[in-house]
Image: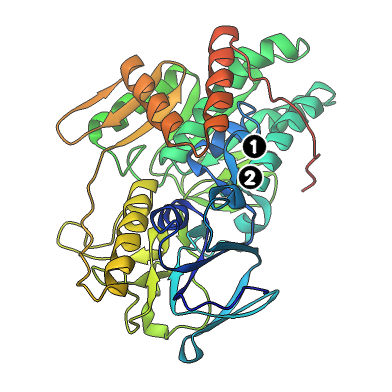
């Protein structure tokens, strides 16, 4: 892998998500040689992927080069590769471009889409976890509009204009609202030969309400906002099959749709090689102690979505969102410094800063510790928090400009089929 030899302890970080990059930043120019490994050369700001899917933003607005993050770190290196196996006895990892030894190993591999064993849905639905997948969804939505305009029958046209989103967590709710705004603002202006009333957005959720992780107040507000945009909400509804056209559920609801977007859950993305009991089978997450050390190993750590740290407040582990990953990355950086100085490490304590979701223009919900609210003010807070959380000044400027333009003109400027999608 052409990493120079050094007297400094070598820290290998697998994954350039929120956890990985915050660890790298915390250890910038400290007494470690850092090797950051990822299968992409960029960090993805996943909370805004849905806006790429719905033509609101271009992908370069929410992606940031990993090498740019470490460009001023004199002892940090990046390698574009995929890790195949960990050999803990040899303190070595195997990758697609060669082997590498380590003194400390940090697993920040995040999650992947969870289809809960439904192979038919996996084969025919659209996931949204990566920039590539978001672009595929964008292309498919726009291609469906074009095909609906030349459809020979009403049934064919309706299938192209039926959009089914499975999973009413923050991702599903936000995507449903964004596609509804395409229907309400873009379709009447760009597609004069289509009737907007023929387009339907269905949001399916297996739980009794939308936004299950958030409060009852947020759920009721979000449902009201979704319905005001024309989204059809179906709770207590599980998808049992999808062959690329026919959607079947556990209820009487059946429909035809050329587009089913799966936002119903995630599972961990562990790397082969560690002891079987180090991974929680149901969640595919590494079991870690309060210092983020993987169970059974002193020099292997896991942070972010892939780490399962249980406590009295979080018996099932911390929520798989950005804040725990950011906080664990920062604390582990400080703990590794303390470890190198032969000092005791500090245990991790999660500081919940609240949760939020946006449903569309002037519509969002926010849950804070002592208050819960929705509407324009919540929408403004959502925008500010996400804007400031983006990596890179340029990305913040570009996103702010796009949001301002979209708000003034009721437009989504990135309506481009750059890479046509084929099922």
Please identify the quadrant where the N terminus is shown. Answer: bottom right
Disc 2 + disc 1, Cβ < 8 Å: yes
- Given residues 295 and 220, the one toward you in this image is 295
Q: Circle 1 is placed at which residue position?
A: 59
Q: CA distance from mark 2 to mark 1?
A: 7 Å
CA neighbours of label 2 inside 10 A, class few (<14), some (14 to 19), many (20+) = many
Which image quarter: residue 217?
top left
Q: Position of residue 271 (x, y in %)?
A: 52, 74
Badge 2 marks a residue whose secondary structure is helix
Residue found at x 16% / y 56%: 313
- Identify the disc placed on residue 357: none
Which image quarter: residue 101?
bottom right
Q: Circle 2 is placed at which residue position?
A: 131
Q: Position of residue 86 (x, y in %)?
A: 53, 81
Q: Position of residue 336 (x, y in %)?
A: 33, 68
Residue found at x 20% / y 64%: 347
Residue found at x 75% / y 14%: 191
Up-down: is 101 above or below 314?
below
Up-down: is 192 above or below 6?
above
């Amino acid at each position: 892998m052409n990493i120079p030899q050094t007297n400094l302890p070598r820290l290998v970080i697998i994954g350039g998500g929120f956890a990985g990059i915050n660890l790298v930043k915390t250890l910038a120019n400290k007494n470690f040689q850092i090797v950051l490994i990822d299968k992409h050369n960029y960090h993805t700001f996943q909370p805004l992927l849905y806006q790429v899917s719905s033509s609101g933003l271009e992908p370069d607005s929410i992606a940031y080069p990993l090498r740019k993050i470490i460009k001023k770190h004199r002892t940090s290196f990046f390698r574009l590769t995929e890790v195949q196996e960990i050999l803990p006895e040899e303190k070595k990892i195997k990758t697609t471009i060669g082997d590498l030894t380590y003194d400390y190993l940090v697993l920040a591999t995040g999650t992947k889409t969870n289809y809960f064993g439904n192979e038919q849905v996996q084969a025919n639905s659209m996931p949204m976890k990566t920039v590539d997948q978001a672009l595929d969804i964008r292309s498919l939505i726009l291609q469906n509009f074009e095909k609906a305009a030349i459809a020979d029958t009403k049934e064919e046209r309706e299938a192209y204009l039926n959009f089914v989103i499975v999973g009413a967590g923050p991702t599903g709710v936000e995507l449903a609202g964004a596609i509804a705004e395409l229907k309400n603002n873009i379709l009447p202006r760009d597609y004069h030969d289509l009737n907007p009333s023929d387009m339907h957005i269905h949001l399916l959720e297996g739980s009794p309400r939308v936004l299950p992780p958030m409060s009852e107040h947020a759920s009721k507000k979000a449902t009201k906002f979704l319905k005001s945009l024309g989204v059809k909400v179906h709770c207590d509804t599980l998808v049992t099959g999808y062959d690329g056209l026919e959607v079947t559920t556990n209820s009487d609801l059946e429909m035809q749709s050329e587009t089913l977007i799966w936002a119903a859950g995630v599972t961990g993305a562990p790397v082969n090689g560690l002891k079987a009991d180090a991974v929680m089978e149901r969640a595919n997450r590494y079991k870690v102690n309060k210092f983020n050390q993987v169970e059974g190993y002193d020099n292997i750590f896991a942070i972010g979505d892939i780490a399962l740290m249980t406590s009295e407040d979080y018996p099932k582990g911390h929520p798989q969102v950005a804040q725990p990953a950011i906080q664990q990355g920062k604390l582990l950086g400080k703990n590794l410094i303390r470890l190198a100085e032969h000092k005791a490490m500090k245990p991790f304590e999660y500081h919940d800063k609240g949760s939020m979701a946006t449903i569309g223009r002037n519509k969002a919900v926010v849950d804070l510790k002592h208050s819960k609210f929705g509407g324009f003010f919540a929408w403004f807070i959502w925008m500010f928090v996400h804007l400031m959380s983006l990596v890179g000044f340029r990305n913040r400027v570009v996103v702010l400009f796009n949001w301002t333009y979209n708000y003034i003109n009721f437009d989504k400027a990135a309506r481009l089929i750059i890479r046509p999608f084929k099922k």
